[in-house]
Amino acid sequence: MWSEYQKGLYLAVSLVGKAQAVLGDLPKEKRQIFSDLVYALEERFAPSCQTELYRVQFKEYRQKASDTLPGLGQSVRRLSNLAYPTAPLELRDTLAKEQFIDALVDSEMRLRIKQSRPKGLNDAIRLAVELEAYNKPESRAIESIGHLRRTTSDERTEAPTSPDTAVSMTQMTTWMQTIENSIQSLTKEIKDLKSQRKFQPRRKINNLQSKGKMGGPCFSCEEIGHFARNCPNNIQILSTRETDNNGTYTDGTVKTLKSEVKYNDKGAVVVTASENAGMFVELSIQGVPVKFVVDTGATLTLVSTRVYDSIPDLCRPHLSKTRSQIKSVSDKYLSPRGKGNFTLDFGQEKLTSEAVVADLQVEGIQGLDFMKKNKCLIDVSANVLHIDNVKVPLCVQGTQNRNADVQRENNVG
């Protein structure tokens, strides 16, 4: 007969995992007392104050996909002992048996176990395991019989002696003959179309195709085959004009501001203006002195990327994305870097204006948006720009390799 000390010592040595942690939480003088160890373990793993919780778990417990039948029975037995600790053993076994049967997923298995009237939980588990062992080969046999039936049905359908088969074969022969006749008629129609196309004149079609490949339509003469810049009508008009010493087209009497458009290797537009081809205003943008082209044809104020990069970092405005598309009069699109608010210093007046930064040959373009906002007036005869009540001098000079006349095209939507 073991003493209380021996039982407590053996129990303390046998504890592992979380139970061993419970032993470590006990005072040193109670670690070898059997009754104290049992009480501590019961409070940790089966507290008597949680019987209501265990009863709810016991009633709501159902078989999981990963649960085996013996494992399900063991879980139900454990919950019954926790939910009804003071109940007699026979009553707990009966409750566990009923809950085990109700927890089964297979309704047919539940019915057969109830019909067998098991005496306790162990009998119910034994019956469930036997039924599961019998049902597996039976279900496989039923599946194989189903496949055999379908195969036999197909074979009977294909039997030539059946009257139904004879009727179906006759219908199939008729359908095949109809399909063959349709294919022959389609083949004949295709051959007729090919023979008709051989005798049709193809010169006009080829001319239209060649013109479509060359370009067009022309927005000047509305002909197909060339663009407006290569229109023969424009070439004839230009040939009747005279040229000055710089090679600029004139009408012989008045010196015009006509500019010649050329294209560089990268496909960008380069405008070579003649003498007196531009009107500029001197100002400072964020403290950097620049010359902007005064252009009422440009609907948007632009700043060159070269000027923007030369602005000190502390004074350089932050750029936001812009959805506007900018193109020149030669229908070439420019790629904007972004838009921002810039401080324009004209000497006597400092103004803030929104401008778009783009890759330009000029330092910037004073657009129509700035002029309308600040009530500007251009006096061409006096070369003066009136900004509200402030007069700013203008300078007219020739420029080389500069972009001009930029207009804004807003996206719709």
Image: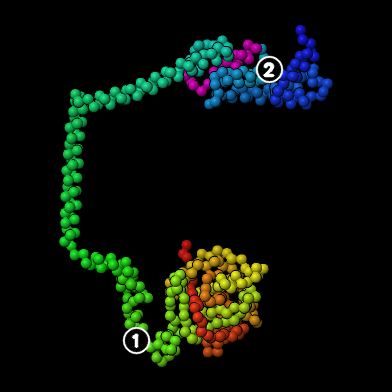
Name which residue lies at 25% across and 66% down.
206
Figure quadrant of residue 33: top right
Indicate which label's residue lies in the foreground, 2 or 1: 1
Disc on res. 240: 1
Q: Main secondary structure of the magenta part?
A: helix
Amino acid type, residue under disc 2 in the picture: Pro
> Mark 2 and mark 1: span between their CA atoms?
118 Å
Q: Residues within 10 Å of mark 1 (few under 14, many from 20)?
A: few
Q: Is residue 221 visible?
A: yes
Q: Position of residue 291 (x, y in %)?
A: 57, 79
Q: Quadrant of the N terminus?
A: top right
Q: Is residue 96 magenta?
A: yes
Q: Position of residue 61 (x, y in %)?
A: 58, 24
Name which residue lies at 62% across and 80% down.
346
Q: Which residue matches tag 2?
A: 85
Q: Residue furthest bottom?
A: 253
Q: Secondary structure at mark 1?
A: loop
Q: In the visual, does 146 lie left or right of 169? A: right
Q: In the visual, does 401 lie left or right of 77? A: left
Q: Which residues are magenta?
A: 89-108
